[in-house]
Amino acid sequence: MPEQGNLRWSKVRRKLFNRSVWRGALAITLGLALWELGRAVKLPLLAAMPAPTEIFGVMLKLVGQASFWGNWVASYQRVLVGFLAAQIVGIPLGLAMAVSRSFYGLTFSTFEIVRPIPPLAWVPLSIIFWPTTESSIAFVIFLGAFFTVVINVLGGARNIDVRYVRSAISLGSRPRDLFFKIVLPATLPSIFTGMAVGMGITWEVVVAAEMIAGKSGLGYLTWSSYVGGNYPQIVVGMMSIGIAGYLSSWAIRLLGKLTMPWLRIF
Amino acid sequence: MATITPPPNTPLTQPLPGDVGLWARLWFRLRYNFTNPESVKNLLLGTAGIVLFVLAWYATTELFKLPRFEKLPGPLAVWQEFTSTDPDFGTSLFTPQYYMHIWWSILRILAAFGLATALGVPLGLFMGWSKAFKDYTFPILELLRPIPVLAWVPLAILMWSGREAPIIFLAFLASFFATVLNTLLGVESIDESFFRAARCLGAKPHHIFFKVVIPGALPFIFTGLQIGMGVAWFSLVAAEMLSGEYGLGYLIWDSYVLSQYSVIVIAMGTLGLVGYLCSAAIRLVGRQLMRGTTRGTV
Amino acid sequence: MSGQSGKISIRNACKVYDPEGVNVCAVDDCSLEIAAGEFCMVVGPSGCGKTTLLNAIAGFHGITSGEIYLDNELLCSSDYTAPPGADRIVVFQNGALFPWYTVLQNVTFGPMVQGVMSEGQAKKAALDLLGELGLRDIADSYPGELSSGMKRRVEIARALVNDPKVLLLDEPFRAMDALTKGVVHEFLLRVYDRMKKTIFFITHDLEEAIFLGSRVVIMTTRPCKVKRVIEVDIPRPRDFHARASERYRQLSSQVVNVVHEEARKAFEAGERELA
């Protein structure tokens, strides 16, 4: 329909000629230019860092190599395994804690005592306990995302407006209906918030683990570039990790939009 | 029958007589917790839960010596080491080294967190205040933010010379992003009516900044500070494990390398406690500063 | 004396919004004269543009054509908008008392930021006013501890302490229950009797309009235009007995008939209820 098309085009046009967008683009371009110049003039901090042009060159070279993408796959594999494990264990646990007062009482105190310990502090114990390097990395990743998931699910489930529960009961719901048709959908937004935050933590842990003890993956790429003296590649590694992480968050947001059509935030 | 538990109604959120001081409030809360049947039951369950956890830990590692668990340090070993005056591995409540490691970590955290707050809060406030400024700075921030802080390790080592600067830089970065974002969110969450009312009453821009923007964004700022503290610890531990020479993160890694496993648990526990205390301190300061808005119901 | 100033003249005001490339005409050729010291009620269906008019008078945004004058000074025209100021203060729908200041600090806010009074003077003026209005006891409370009726009264006090020419009220009692509303109505009537300020009061509650106002201006659905003006000649001072009088009932049925037609049009046009 021509009307629809016109409206969409005018929206796109608005985006293109939007002052904010131009300002942002200008800022980034200026930043890159200053970085490049700063290197040439040997400014204190910038002198040690590789220049944007070098980085771009290395990036172009790497994009054609299979081993580079192999690192992507390796990192994503680790992220997926640890993250999914955290969701599979964490979401039911959080829901159970929200629903049963006594279960909550029993578990929450221990949970709150263990939670402040940073996930990476678990690395040594994890290595001692688990047979392979991969499984110990996966465990630490699991821990990182696990606590976030449970806290968010708990918060979401406990803050369900009591009126929803009461309407459901007065409409004749049994406990089973109540759980699957009220509690679960109402907690979904918090679950996805927990996932989004948990994904961020997961990537942090993956990168650290790969730097400390990995033999593949984007974190390993970044660290070994440093050790090997290939400084522009460090930045390529960093950028790749950033993009990879952003893509995972985007995937979660997409999943959120699909499962929760009634919300407009995702 | 499944019940959804409504949020606990702690006395701190109910209006107290007059302007009751901090200690009095603490006393009211303690008394409430110990005399109220509901919360006594929770207290008992909580203690039971912790006891169960420790028992399970003991059973798997020292009592039954299950296959992989036996290599882990058990609660008895850890307790012995922690409380002995002449510990095998040189780290216990009574040795100065223990406190030295804590001190180093805390110093670094204070430096990193302090810097992040000093730079981040004003930046966030200004970004919320001026759309033009936000247009120029926000895209750069959003480009850098997805990069996990620990991916900066090699670059940090290149950029900064010395041993301490890269570690503090990493903890700073993590805390900085969280602080700026939450401060910005705080400013943007202030209802338009407050700005309009202030303008009606004759407020000039600098009045609005100091009397509306800052108090209005304060709740979000403190949430951001707590998050910032948490991520600062996260990054600090990693950085210390990779390249430190003192500090709790270093202690964990070093104990692992030297096979002094019980010390690992001591360090982990200490980390958890210190981290918790730091966040609690921020919460306390926040509550004092925002006494007006948190008193009574919103 | 406040009775002499505060005359508002709205001449052929038009306001066109342009949200997503779609022109929305909120106000179309609206003309209205409000005398100094008059209690003017503006009534109309939700979303018809009354708030747009109020915002223009207050200076929060401009108008696309036409003029608005305050005491023969230009407030608003197609290329000029006077900035918001303490000569015409707004009391908002959901209340805008600063939750981080006490009642006293809120009320002294205006004089102090304007620099017209020292802190001591401002405090004294505020406490005096609060005392007159029966709000002295809550001077050191925070808004979070007050009921909605009290909050609204404090907000009115905060406006009054600046001696504005005009008081602009945008459905201030909308969220209140009827009983509280009754009490706050009497409060507002007492304030008006004492200070005789020009009041521009937007509401959709017809009973409130007739009970409080000297004139009821009925607006059409969007775009907003003056449909009818009904003079309310119930004598002042009024109290709740006025609601039972014959004259009140006559005016009530007059207003209802006029408004209902517009309300039906708005409903059928699918105007979204303001949240």
Image (cartoon, rainbow, N blue to C red):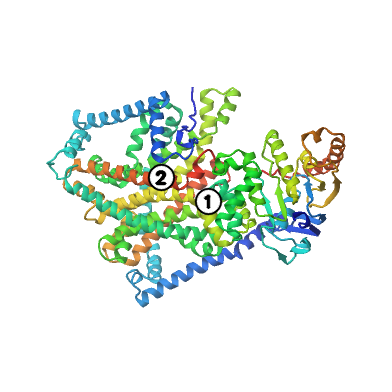
Q: Is residue B249 left or right of residue C243?
A: left
> For mark 2, does the 10 Å Cα neighbourhood hold few (<14), some (14 to 19), or many (20 or more) residues?
some
- Screen quadrant of the C terminus of chain B: top right
Q: Is residue A64 visible?
A: no
| Residue A181 drawn at (x, y percent) | 54, 30
Residue pushed farthest bottom? Answer: A41
Q: Is residue B160 left or right of residue C106?
A: left
Q: Is residue B258 left or right of residue B157?
A: left
Which is more toward the observer, B202 or B72?
B202
Q: Position of residue B29 (x, y in %)?
A: 41, 33
Whether marks 2 and 1 lie on the same chain: yes
Does residue A30 appear in the picture of this structure?
yes
Label 2 vs label 1: CA separation? Answer: 17 Å
In the depicted structure, whether residue C67 falls above or below residue A260: below
Q: Secondary structure at mark 2?
A: helix
Residue B216 numbered tag: 1
What kind of residue is marked 2?
Arg
Vertical order, B215 against B63 (above or below): below
Type of amino acid at the residue the image marks with label 1: Gly
Helix, strand or loop under label 1 = helix
Q: Which residue is mark 2?
A: B283
Measured from the top left, where is residue B33 in percent x and y?
39, 29
Q: How many marks?
A: 2
